[in-house]
Image (spheres, coloured by chain):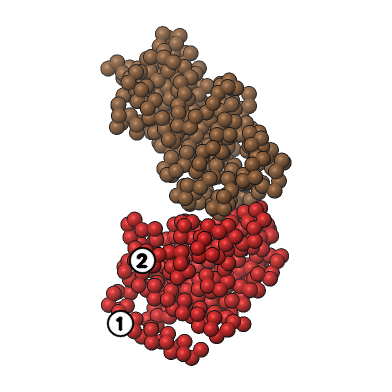
Chain colours: A red, B brown
């Protein structure tokens, strides 16, 4: 278990990422707030508790890697990288603008520790396998975390990669499915069902852990458990809420790729800060 | 006689001692001859099974981690992974693709295994170098040279055995066409399996008192603009010959240069917007108009247009 202080620190990071996501997508008047917010606690726990990295050295060869396979959650990644000191905060304002390093979907940038070019769904797990395989060949101990969307699992390439990792005994890769239940046009289960998800991953040879993807201690436990399993890779199915933290956006299909207006954001911000203050006090 | 794929396989095994090299196969290494590397360095040889998209997406991760990836499979199945090839191109990654059984050379397997679109498609990807070696000597040279080329390479190999044209001292130079026969009346620009056919066409033309220049344009991208302009200026008419669709291959690449520099008549020998079919390779080359006689005919047409 983690201490209350650590939980508070992580909650603070998660809150900051939420605010950044909303501000970046509203400023750009485009982007994907819903799926960024469902990922915010996973990204928080990875960057600020689980992953081994060294903010002064984005090129540290032994750093753990996060591949954001669901590239449309880029605002959450950029915000976390800014919080961790890899990206200058000022750059967040350029998100989705011409000439910006912070493209609409991540573009690999070793200096900013953006590990992979994603956006075309279905490729991140295989990319992660490649990095994990290179780690094995080079005798390095880093781990590779791959965050996927749930709708993304409709891509066949995900399952080619899912077949590959256990066969090659890659115990240094951890797949995370952000199971928010919604894709662009509606629920996954009324689009093309991806269930039974646990059984699918298990039958492909993965160790599977189900967690509440917004429960920070539960997420940490899952990642710790994943590190202990040595004979196979682990897939963490993180049950999340699309648009998490923004009442008017939770479970809203349209929040997938429709940011809030400047006015709506201005109206809800004081409430978000107040709610956050109360939550922190209650801890 | 030895095929370009076999020369590649042997060369790869020879340069393979470099620890950063990883070779990826999609269960065709006995055909592509990448198996030679696999026998020598099993730890750095991975058979992905029949999963080309997975292979190339994994190649992305390997290249991100400093590996120099060689991937070898049938050309037509490389194209299955266009999405992943875009990422390799965008990130300018050290992935060298050696695509065998290209063109019509997988004759009897038929249209599903033949590849007459690859050069057009690969040419549209920024950062990719696109190369078509003409014989075993050049194939070996390209394999070795690809280690020194930074970024992605697409090299097109043939299933068929083909005659050796170059002597062992031949050196491949990226982006440089090579004059194989010098003449003054017209220029035949070609590569790959069409080079020896172009040389035969040139012998036929010489009998008629016409002297053509024959150029081996093995690098399709970046194309040798300087040489193309020079040929247009000196010869005044050009024939391109390729084992590929006439849409988007070397004929197009040459015309794109001429259109904005020094336009001259161009005749195109290639496959006219059709798919292949099952058949013996030589029969298919005849059926689709890819013979020395076809190059001869196109040359006469180009000359006529030049005189007009």
How far apart marks 1 and 2 lie (CA) works out to 24 Å
SS of the residue at dot 2?
A: helix
Q: Position of residue A251 (x, y in %)?
A: 43, 78
- Tell me if residue A34 comes above or below residue B71 in the rendering: below
Q: Who is closer to the viewer here, A280 or A231?
A: A280
Q: Which residue is mark 2?
A: A90
Q: Nearer the viewer, residue A78 or B88?
A: A78
Question: If you read the primary sequence from the N terminus, does the residue marked by circle 1 or circle 2 appear first?
Answer: 2
Seen at 39% across and 25% down, the residue is: B227
State the residue in front, A267 or A122: A267
Q: What residue is at 60 percent from the left and 22 percent from the top?
A: B168
> Is A29 placed above or below A156 here?
below
Labels 1 and 2 in the same subunit:
yes
Q: Nearer the viewer, mark 1 or mark 2?
A: 2
- Residue A162 is at least partly visible in this image: no
Frontmost residue, B116 versus A27: A27
Is A40 rendered above or below residue B286? below
Question: In this figure, which residue is indicated by the disc labeled 1?
Answer: A267
The residue shown at (57%, 80%) is: A217
Farthest front residue in view: A56
The picture quadrant where one finds residue A3 is: bottom right
Chain containing the residue with disc 2: A
Chain letter for mark 1 = A
**Residue A87 coordinates in the image, percent (x, y):** 43, 64
A252 to the left or right of A235? left
Q: In percent of the image, x 64 and y 36: which residue is there?
A: B15
Q: Residues within 10 Å of mark 2 (few under 14, many from 20)?
A: few
């Amino acid at each position: 278990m983690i201490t209350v202080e650590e939980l508070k620190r992580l909650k603070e990071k998660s809150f900051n990422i939420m605010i950044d996501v909303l501000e970046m997508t509203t400023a750009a008047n485009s982007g994907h707030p819903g799926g960024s917010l469902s990922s915010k606690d996973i990204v928080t726990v990875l960057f600020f508790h689980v992953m081994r990295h060294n903010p002064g050295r984005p090129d540290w060869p032994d750093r753990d890697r996060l591949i954001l396979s669901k590239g449309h959650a880029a605002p959450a990644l950029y915000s976390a990288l800014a919080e961790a000191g890899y990206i200058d905060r000022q750059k967040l304002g350029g998100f989705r603008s011409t000439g910006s390093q912070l493209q609409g979907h991540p573009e690999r940038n070793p200096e900013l520790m953006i590990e992979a070019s994603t956006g075309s769904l279905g490729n991140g797990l295989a990319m992660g396998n490649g990095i994990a395989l290179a780690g094995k060949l080079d005798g390095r101990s880093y781990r590779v975390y791959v965050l996927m969307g749930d709708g993304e699992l409709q891509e066949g390439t995900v399952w080619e990669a899912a077949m590959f990792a256990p066969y090659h005994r890659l115990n240094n890769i951890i797949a995370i499915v952000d199971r928010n239940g919604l894709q662009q046009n509606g629920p996954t289960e009324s689009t093309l069902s991806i269930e039974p998800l646990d059984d699918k991953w298990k039958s492909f040879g993965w160790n599977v852990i189900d967690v509440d993807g917004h429960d920070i201690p539960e997420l940490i436990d899952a990642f710790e458990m994943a590190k202990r399993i040595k004979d196979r890779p682990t897939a963490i199915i993180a049950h999340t809420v699309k648009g998490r933290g923004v009442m008017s956006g939770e479970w809203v299909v349209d929040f997938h790729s429709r940011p809030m207006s400047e006015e709506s954001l201005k109206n809800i911000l004081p409430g978000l800060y107040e709610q956050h203050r109360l939550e922190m006090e209650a801890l | 006689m030895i095929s370009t794929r076999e020369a590649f396989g042997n060369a790869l095994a020879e340069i393979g001692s470099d620890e950063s090299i990883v070779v990826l196969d999609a269960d065709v290494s006995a055909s592509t001859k990448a198996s030679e590397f696999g026998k020598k360095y099993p730890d750095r040889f991975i058979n992905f099974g029949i999963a080309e998209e997975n292979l190339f997406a994994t190649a992305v991760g390997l290249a991100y981690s400093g590996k120099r990836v060689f991937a070898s499979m049938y050309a037509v199945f490389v194209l299955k992974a266009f999405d992943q090839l875009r990422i390799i191109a965008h990130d300018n990654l050290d992935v060298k693709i050696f695509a065998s059984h290209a063109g019509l050379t997988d004759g009897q397997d038929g249209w599903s295994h033949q590849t007459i679109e690859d050069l057009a498609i690969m040419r549209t990807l920024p950062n990719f170098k696109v190369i078509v070696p003409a014989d075993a000597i050049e194939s070996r040279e390209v394999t070795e040279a690809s280690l020194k080329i930074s970024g992605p390479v697409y090299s097109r190999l043939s299933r068929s055995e083909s005659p050796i044209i170059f002597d062992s001292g031949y050196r491949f130079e990226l982006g440089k066409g090579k004059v194989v026969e010098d003449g003054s009346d017209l220029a035949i620009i070609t590569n790959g399996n069409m080079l020896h056919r172009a040389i035969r066409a040139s012998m036929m033309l010489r009998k008629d008192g016409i002297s053509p220049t024959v150029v081996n344009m093995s690098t399709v991208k970046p194309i040798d603009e300087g040489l193309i302009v020079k040929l247009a200026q000196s010869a005044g008419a050009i024939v391109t010959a390729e084992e590929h669709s006439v849409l988007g291959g070397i004929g197009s690449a040459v015309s794109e240069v001429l259109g904005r520099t020094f336009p001259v008549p161009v005749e195109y020998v290639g496959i006219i917007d059709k798919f292949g079919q099952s058949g013996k390779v030589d029969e298919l080359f005849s059926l689709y108009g890819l013979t020395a006689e076809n190059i001869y005919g196109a040359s006469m047409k180009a000359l006529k247009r030049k005189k007009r």
